[in-house]
């Protein structure tokens, strides 16, 4: 029993200690979506869907919930955001080559169609991020139309 108490005490000390070391937050100032919005021209409905369901993990600005101040949750969220930005970062859209933009939209369509995005872990605490069938359709239709425009520009002359 003494061993269990020592382990419990050690875990408590570690838990308290990590509260003082926080991961870097994804909160750069500025309008991170301007280039993306201008280039892809989503409808107001699609803009709202992207804002509510995508931008927190796929841009350079995350709106953090209150519980992000508590470790180890803060590390878990930081890892999700880092991974999300690795796959697609709307804030970096203007740096992507045309072929990469087309591919990212193709992946977006697949992920939404297969209900892989937004992540279930995200929608547990962000109910507004859950996509209805109509929202999925609107998002995929916009992405398909935008891809078609990119593909026209990718064709050799």
Image (cartoon, helix red, strand yellow):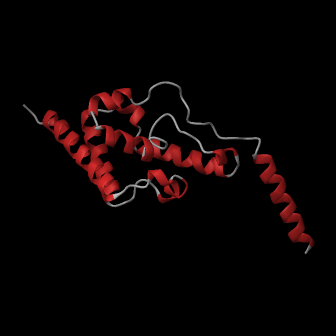
Q: In screen coordinates, is 83 left or right of 113?
A: right
Q: Position of residue 23 (x, y in %)?
A: 65, 40
Q: Residue at x 65, y 51 (%)?
A: 73
Furthest residue toward bottom? 1
> If the image is split into quadrants, where does the N terminus sit?
bottom right
Looking at this view, name the residue that lies furthest to the top.
30
**Number of marks present in the image shown:** 0
State the image coordinates of residue 123 (x, y, percent, origin top left): 49, 56
Horizontally, residue 32 falls left or right of residue 133, namely right
Closer to us: 1 or 27:
27
Q: Toward which corner of the image does residue 147 lie, by quadrant? A: top left
Image point (27%, 33%), residue name: 41
Q: Quadrant of the C terminus?
A: top left
Q: Name the outermost residue toward the right.
A: 2
- Residue nearest the observer in this picture, 87 or 70: 70
Q: Is residue 111 above or below residue 7?
A: above
Q: Residue at x 46, y 56 (%)?
A: 119
In the rendered image, residue 38, in percent from the top left (x then y), is placed at 30, 28
Classify 42 as above or below 13.
above
In the rendered view, would you say 69 is above or below 36? below
Q: Quadrant of residue 87?
A: top left
The percent coordinates of residue 107 (x first, y second) are 31, 50
């Amino acid at each position: 029993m003494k061993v269990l108490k020592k382990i419990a005490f050690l875990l408590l000390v570690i838990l308290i200690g990590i509260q003082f070391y926080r991961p870097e937050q994804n909160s750069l100032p500025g309008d991170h979506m301007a280039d993306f919005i201008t280039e892809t021209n989503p409808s107001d409905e699609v803009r709202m869907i992207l804002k509510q369901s995508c931008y927190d993990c796929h841009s350079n600005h995350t709106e953090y919930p209150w519980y992000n101040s508590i470790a180890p949750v803060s590390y878990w969220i930081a890892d999700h955001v880092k991974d999300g930005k690795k796959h697609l970062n709307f804030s970096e859209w203007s740096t992507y080559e045309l072929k990469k933009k087309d591919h990212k939209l193709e992946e977006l369509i697949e992920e939404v169609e297969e209900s892989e995005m937004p992540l279930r872990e995200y929608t547990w605490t962000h109910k507004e991020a859950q996509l209805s069938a109509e929202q999925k359709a609107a998002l995929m239709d916009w992405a398909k139309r935008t891809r078609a425009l990119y593909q026209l520009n990718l064709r050799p002359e």
